[in-house]
Image (spheres, rainbow, N blue to C red):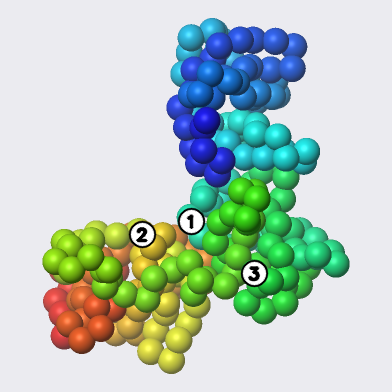
């Protein structure tokens, strides 16, 4: 079945009053509600959709784009806080639930937090602001002799998460922590901002990543 929390390109197999039904890649079908149907769509067409669980925990497709997919992080506003946790605005009709146990600090209504999309033990999508549970500190591999996933000079995708005493921390390619030192920042940046960056240096002593916003930066 089309994996929950990810984007898929699926084929239209049926058009009904409720909307489109898409091939779920395992012999079943997923509903794309009528209000999101592309104009002029026909059986056999392919549509890129995001798959998640609706309010009754049924898989459903949407052409809306959430702020983050599974195993990605983004800055999200708190829609509500209840006795079980917080609900984040992430761009879909159903808010993303962040249990209290996944909150680095207790979330407050109206504030924004960087949240990582993961799953609970039932397979439902949830959010976590305990980023260190999900983002790796370094490039060390558990496989001896494995090729390094990044090299000095590589262009990478950054999500700025917050200030430190030496600059800003950033999530690199949704997977690793990196540091953007003050000396490498020549324009205004802010937590929650996405931008392109470059691997300035991979420190030999601990395999941690130093970053730059310029491709011509040299290691120091």
The quadrant where residue 219 appears: bottom left
Tag 2, which secondary structure? loop
Asked whether disc 2 touches disc 1, contact meaning CB atoms under 8 Å apart, the reply is no
* Left or right placement of residue 116 versus residue 199 in this view: right
Classify mark 3: residues with Cα within 10 Å, few (<14), some (14-19) or many (20+): many
Q: Nearer the viewer, mark 3 or mark 1?
A: 3
Label 2 – label 1 distance at C-alpha: 9 Å
Q: Earlier in the sequence, mark 2 or mark 3?
A: 3
Name the mark on residue 45.
none
Residue located beneath label 3 in the image: 102
Q: Residue furthest bottom?
A: 165
The quadrant where residue 4 appears: top right
Residue located beneath label 1 in the image: 72
Residue located beneath label 2 in the image: 173
**Does residue 201 appear in the picture of this structure?**
yes
Where is residue 164 drawn, in percent x and y? 45, 86
**Does residue 212 appear in the picture of this structure?**
no
Q: Which residue is drawn at the image coordinates 54% and 8% (left, top)?
A: 42
Q: How many marks?
A: 3
Tag 1, which secondary structure? loop
Tag 3, which secondary structure? helix
Q: Which residue is drawn at the image coordinates 17% and 82% (left, top)?
A: 204
Q: Residue furthest right?
A: 83
Q: Which residue is drawn at the image coordinates 23% and 65% (left, top)?
A: 143
Where is residue 71 drawn, in percent x and y? 48, 55
Q: Nearer the viewer, residue 169 or 10?
A: 10
Q: Which residue is drawn at the image coordinates 77% and 65% (left, top)?
A: 85
Where is residue 116 drawn, in percent x and y? 54, 61
Q: Where is 146 relative to 162, above or below? A: above
Asked whether disc 2 touches disc 3, contact meaning CB atoms under 8 Å apart, the reply is no
Q: Earlier in the sequence, mark 2 or mark 1?
A: 1
């Amino acid at each position: 079945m089309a994996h929950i929390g990810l984007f898929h390109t699926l084929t239209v197999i049926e058009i009904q009053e409720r909307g489109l039904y898409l091939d779920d890649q395992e012999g079943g079908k997923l509903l794309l509600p009528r209000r999101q149907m592309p104009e002029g769509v026909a059986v056999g067409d392919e549509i890129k959709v995001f798959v998640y669980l609706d309010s009754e925990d049924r898989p459903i497709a949407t052409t809306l784009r959430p702020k983050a997919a599974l195993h990605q992080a983004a800055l999200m506003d708190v829609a509500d806080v209840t006795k079980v946790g917080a609900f984040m605005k992430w761009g879909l009709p159903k808010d993303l639930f962040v249990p209290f146990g996944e909150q680095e600090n207790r979330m407050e209504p109206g504030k924004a937090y960087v949240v990582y999309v993961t799953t609970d033990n039932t397979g439902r999508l949830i959010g976590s602001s305990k980023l260190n549970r999900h983002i790796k500190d370094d490039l060390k591999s558990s496989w001896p002799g494995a090729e390094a996933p990044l090299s000095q000079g590589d262009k990478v995708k950054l999500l700025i998460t917050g200030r430190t005493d030496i600059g800003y921390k950033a999530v690199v390619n949704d997977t690793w922590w990196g540091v953007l030192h003050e000396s490498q920042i020549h324009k205004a940046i802010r937590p929650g901002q996405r931008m392109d960056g470059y691997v300035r240096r991979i420190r030999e002593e601990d395999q941690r990543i130093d970053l730059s916003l310029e491709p011509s930066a040299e290691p120091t």
